[in-house]
Image (cartoon, coloured by chain):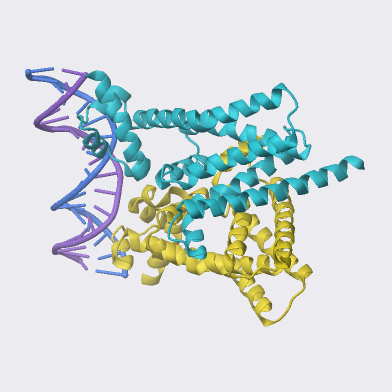
Chain colours: A yellow, B cyan, C blue, D purple
Amino acid sequence: MAKDSKERLLEAGTKVFAKDGFEGASTRKIVKEAGVNISAIPYYFGSKDGLYEAVIRRIISMVFAEQGEKASEISAALESGKISKERARGFLHDLLRGFAEFLLSDRASPQMAQIMVREQMQPTVVFDIIYKGAMEPVHQTLTRLVAHLTDLPSDSQRAILCTHTIIGQLTTFKTHKEMILRRSGWKKYSDKEAETIIDAVLFNTDAIIAAHKKANKKESLL
Amino acid sequence: MAKDSKERLLEAGTKVFAKDGFEGASTRKIVKEAGVNISAIPYYFGSKDGLYEAVIRRIISMVFAEQGEKASEISAALESGKISKERARGFLHDLLRGFAEFLLSDRASPQMAQIMVREQMQPTVVFDIIYKGAMEPVHQTLTRLVAHLTDLPSDSQRAILCTHTIIGQLTTFKTHKEMILRRSGWKKYSDKEAETIIDAVLFNTDAIIAAHKKANKKESLL
DNA sequence: GTCTATAGTCGGATAGAC
DNA sequence: GTCTATCCGACTATAGAC
C-alpha cells in the first residue's frame, strides 16, 4: 500500500538519520530498514533531502506534543494575569526538568543532537522547522518566566541572554558529554546522574535569578 | 621537497577540515588546496584518517600554546601556596574571558566546533588527543579555581559539575549560535556582542560561586 | 505503486613509471 | 618523492517494464 511505504520510510528514516546523521545515513540503509524499494524515496519525497525534511517535521511534531504544549499553557497563564513568583519559579523548574530529562535520556540520540548542533552552526532550511516548531516557543516561555522572576522586561536583552545561559548549563551535558563523563568518573547518565545534574542546574538557576533581580533592583533605584 | 609537501598538506588539511568537517572534506580538495599530488596523502600520512589525526594534533599544540600554558601557570600557583580569593577570582575571569574570546571569534570555525561536538558525543581516537592536550588541563584548572573560591574540595563532584555548568554557559553561544542570534536580533558576534556575552557569563559565574560558597558553609556548620 | 537495472558521480587508495 | 592512470566501492537518482 502507498500509505504504508511512506510511513515505513518515515519511521526508518527517523531511526537511521538519528543513528548515522544525514551524511552517514544512506538511502540504501534506510530502504533496507523500511523494507521498501529504493525508488520509493524519490517517488514519495522527491529526494533524500526531502525525506530528511519530512523526518525532521515528524520529530518536531512529536517533541512539541511533549514539551511545547506545556510551554504554551504557561505562556497563556503569564499573559492572562499576574502569577505569583512562587508559581513562576515552579513553572521554570518544571520546564527545565522536563527538558533535562529528555536531553539526558536515550530518546535524545547523540546523532540527533549533532544534527541540531550542525543546524545551529550552519543552518539549512531544516533549521527553520526546528526553530519555529520547538525551540522558539520554549525559549520564549523560559524568557518570560525569567523576566517575571527578575522583574526585567521580557523582551530585554538581559532576560534573553540570562535565559540562554541557563539553558546552556543543561545542553552542555549533551554536547560535551564525554568530557563530563571523564571528569566526573561516571560511565553514563542513568537516573541518578540525571538527578544530580538537574539539582545542580536548578540550584544555579535560582542563584543567577536572585543575583539578576538584586542587580536590577539596584539599578532601578538610581 | 619532502618536508614541504607534508607541511603543505597539514596546512591545507587544517583549512579544509575546519571548513567542511571530516566527511565533507575530500582528499581531492585538500591536495588541490595544498598544490600537491593526491598520492602524497597515503604516502605521508597513510590515509585520510592519518592526515586528520595529524591535523588535530597540530591544532591542539597551537591552542595549547595560547590557552593551556596560562592554565598551567595558574595551577602551579594554586599548588605552590595559598592565593587570595580575590586573585583566584581574577584568574578565573581571565581564563573564562580568554576562552570566550577564542570561542566567539572567527578563529574557532563552526566546522571545528562541530568536530569537537561530534567527538564528544561519539568519541574516536581523536577525542583522546583533544581531551588530554587541551580540555583536561583547562577544565582541571578551572575546577581548582572554583573549588578554591567555594571552599569545596577540588576533586569533589560538586566542584566539577559547577565548573562544567559555568563552561556550558559559554559554549552554548557557539553550539546554539543560530538560536541566540535569532532571539537576540544580532547579526553576528562582533566585539560588542562578545563583550556583552562575557559580561553576562562572568556575572552569573560570580552569582553561582557565591551561592555555592554560602550553601557549603551552611552544610559545614551542621 | 512497485520493481529491476543502470546511469552517472564521487570517494579513497594503489600500481607502477619516472 | 612525485607523478599519471586506474581500480573499486558507494552513493543518489532515473528510465522504463510490470
Q: Residue at x 68, y 49 (%)?
A: A194
Find residue D12 and report its horizontal and vertical position in percent: 28, 55
Is residue D18 depicted above or below B39 in this figure? below
Q: Quadrant of residue A30?
A: bottom left
Q: Residue at x 43, y 60 (%)?
A: B187
Find residue B180 and report its horizontal and vertical position in percent: 51, 59
Q: Tally the marks.
A: 0
Which residue is at the front of the view, B162 or D13? B162
Q: Residue at x 56, y 68 (%)?
A: A64
Find residue A178 and report its horizontal and vertical position in percent: 57, 39
Left/right of residue A104 with respect to residue A116 in the rendered view: right
Which residue is at the front of the view, B47 or B132? B132
Q: Quadrant of residue B107?
A: top left
Find residue B42 and report its horizontal and vertical position in percent: 28, 26
Q: Quadrant of the C terminus of chain B?
A: top right
Left/right of residue B217 with respect to residue A198 in the rendered view: right
Q: Quadrant of the N terminus of chain B?
A: top left
Which residue is at the front of the view, B32 or A107? B32
Question: Is residue B102 shown to the viewer in this render?
Answer: yes
Q: Quadrant of residue B49?
A: top left
- Spot the residue most to the bottom: A80
